[in-house]
Image (cartoon, grey):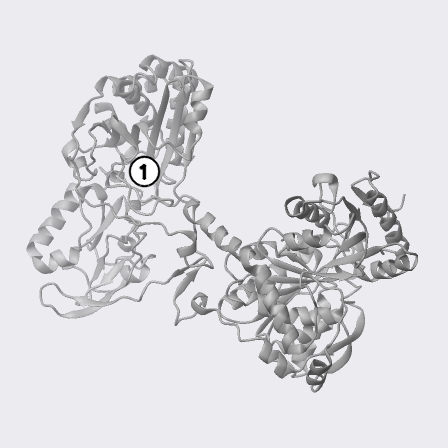
Amino acid sequence: MGQLFAVEVVYRGVFQKTLAKNITRDIVLAAHNEGKLGISFGRYGDAPERNGIPAKSFAIVANDEQTLEEGMAQYEPKHVDLTVVLDDTLSKGAESWAWYGLQPVHHALKPGATLIVISQEDAPALLKNIHRRDKAYKLAILKGITSFSGMWVFKDDHTDVRVLGAIASALPQLFSLNSVLQFINEKLKSELKVISARNAFDRFSTVDVPAGQGNPEELFKFELPGWDHMRDGVSIKGQPQGGPYADPVTGEVGGFRPARNELFKKYSTRSMRPVVNFSTCTKCTLCGLNCPDASFDITPDGHYDANLESCCGCGICEEVCPVKECVTMVNESEFHDNKSQWEAFRKDKDAYLNWLETTIAKASPIEKRSHGFRYRGQYQEQVPEALEVARKG
Amino acid sequence: MATLTLPVEEKKKSKINEQEALITGAEAIAIACKLANVDVVTAYPIRPYDTVMQYISQLVADGEMDCEYIVAEGEHSQFEIVKHASVCGARVFCGSSGVGWMYAMEALTVSPALRVPMVCMVGNRALDDPGAFGVEHNDALAVRDLGWLLTWVDSAQEALDTALIAYRVAEDRRIFVPLAISCDGAFLTHSQALVKIPAAELVKKFLPAYNRGDLLLHPDNVISVAPQANEDWVMEIRRQNYKVTEVACDVIREVYAEFEHTFGRKYGNPFFEEYMTEGADVVLLGMGTMSTPVKVAVRKLREEGKKVGFVRLRWFRPFAGPEIAKCLERFKAVGVIDRDFSFGSPDLSGVVATEVRSAMYSSSSTRPPVIGFIGGLGGREITVPDVETMTDIVFRAAKGKAQPLTQWFGLRE
């Protein structure tokens, strides 16, 4: 068998689909400049991909046809030489449609290989979210705002070529910078993009992550039943109704917490989460009524508390909330657990409100992009800023 | 006509409340629906199935039958409605013909995995184009690989009896898949014959209430039916359906025995009827009302000293492969008459001939030659002289003379 390379690009469904496809295609074309052969393909996480669902695109490259075929003779590569994460909120893991449980974002990464994350955070902040593993690896951060290049509102921010430049540095056996630049000159025909790729190559650096370092969260998973242990009739047991629960301070029982699917939590779909100011809330109920997934627990004192194992971060609650500064969508990278906000509020009101204020201030939505756009044209407004972040590297 | 014999005692018992009526095959099915106390019937007209919906609506209008009778806006909805009603615990009936059946195809394909024991009547009809009303079996056969049980009947009496048997088979918890009873358009759906109608109390005894158990969609049994599934579930769901095929023959045998015990009418082997096969050198095999000209020809040929018999296949799904092979390997050659075609199949034969050859290959050590005949398409007559010529060909094959494996009959040259 000849040399075989597998690169995985983890992205947010729909929003980054074209970008991920372009990157894996460009990897194959750049490697082809060195006489290598390759195939690029997508394994969507949902059909059709829904907003924010974690999904993957792959590039398989080999130096001969038979080796390529061996690399392709499986559903998707189980071991990859490089993982590229196009949205740093995916660091918390992916619960893809065809996977029952939560996968760490580096689950296919070979020992010692490189994980590239596009982010504005630094390594310690990202490692609060990226799960620990029993094999060491390298972490590289490509400074940038989550890119939507390739969406129908296409505004190119050079993320595609910056990733190529970074790969040339991380995995020079796959292709050299020259092959990348040749590809850009011939196919993309952009001198600016040549500069972006070269900058990414020059500034590329990695942090060694030893075994055991990272988010200690236990990944939830479950066993798939055999055909003769499954219910038949393509039927599943419904969820029980749920019911009231206790106030952590007074012990008063009341409200309503819907029972939820323990096997499919889907919070890894979320790139923003609602934070609620319970002191301004008028208990109008609109957020709870309008939530498409019944993700709000009605608390014993009549508040609406977003259940963060269930919430997929669509932002409808923020949109329908009639109170100024009550429900605010905040980028997911600010948070490292799914604990109840209302319980924190009940236990220490002042501390919670203080936390709320600093969290919202720190995560101004203009600086950290997510799919939760607030108004038409917001994306276009952010492009110059995105380019600026990329230029600084 | 199926050979029906009644033991004397049984005759006395069942005759008490039995009535006799001159009715069509379609009417016989409608009466079976009444006797089976069907809860939901959906209808959309297409000939020749539409006669059933007319008879049922008449029964409802006359106050003889109590059911939800829903006229859908097309066959797709017609089959979707009964699918949903069945999941909610209703005993259901519907049916269609030809391209109407095809228009329902999406609903037909989803029902088996959902374990929906809907019983349907297919008034077999040629598929358009050209628009034609005559019988051809390709309509019902289109679902042969999709999880449906398929049976063909050849008389109004058998249509009525089989409809009762069908509910008992389909609603058996080991089965729980849809079942279609094929009735040849015009020849059976529109021909009136004398039919014995069993007493309602006996039917009640024979047919227990439909019990969907833990698959019942009901507020007291909260389940979600047909959620989205991916690579991790589909094979297991298919395997569950496959299990039905493993037990279907046993269940059918049990139900026929129970039928005979309750009503006193005997069908012998449930899967096929043998006619004058004793001492035969060769046999013909086919499904549906072609049995009439074939039996007449067989009798004529027997009088001429030609040892030929006939095997009429009743159940196509399940295909009782080993049993059929065991039956057929007694003969020196077999001629299969297909009222259908199977485009581009091995030997370019019809569907039944291909299945018979396949069954013989794995379950017979002698493997006599199987000659395929395609005839009677679009309702064309299969004549007695046609059958005589077919028999001659099969005899030549029996003597070791090579014959074309597929031949068309009744075709204008």
Disc 1 marks a residue whose amino acid type is Tyr
Q: Is residue B325 left or right of residue A372?
A: right
Residue B6, picture quadrant:
bottom right
Q: Residue A242, position in %: x, y?
A: 27, 66
Q: Position of residue A317 (x, y in %)?
A: 28, 55
Foreground of the two, B327 or A118: B327
Residue toward you, B49 or B359: B359
Asked if one can make out residue B193 in the rendered structure from this viewpoint, the answer is: yes
Q: Quadrant of residue A76?
A: top left
Instruction: Looking at the picture, tell me which residue is in the foreground, A324 or B118.
Output: B118
Q: Is residue B72 visible?
A: no
Q: Which residue is mark 1?
A: A379
Q: Quadrant of the C terminus of chain B?
A: top right
The quadrant holding residue B46 is bottom right
Q: Residue at x 26, y 33 (%)?
A: A145
Residue A114: give x, y in percent of width and height. Answer: 25, 26
In the rendered image of this protein, does residue A175 appear above or below residue A123?
above
Circle 1: element type: helix
Q: Is residue A94 above or below residue B378?
A: above
Specify whether A391 is left or right of B220. left
Q: Residue B206: x, y in percent?
A: 59, 76
Q: If the image is split into quadrants, where does the N terminus of chain B sit?
A: bottom right
Q: Residue furthest front?
A: B279
The answer to whether B338 appears left or right of B228 in the picture is right
Residue at the bottom extreme, as displayed: B16
Q: Is residue A382 above or below residue A186?
A: below
Check disc 1: other Cα within 10 Å, few if <14, some if 14-19, many if 20+.
many
In this rendering, the count of numbered labels is: 1
Residue at 27%, 59% in the rendered image: A287
**Left/right of residue B136 with respect to residue B233 in the rendered view:** right
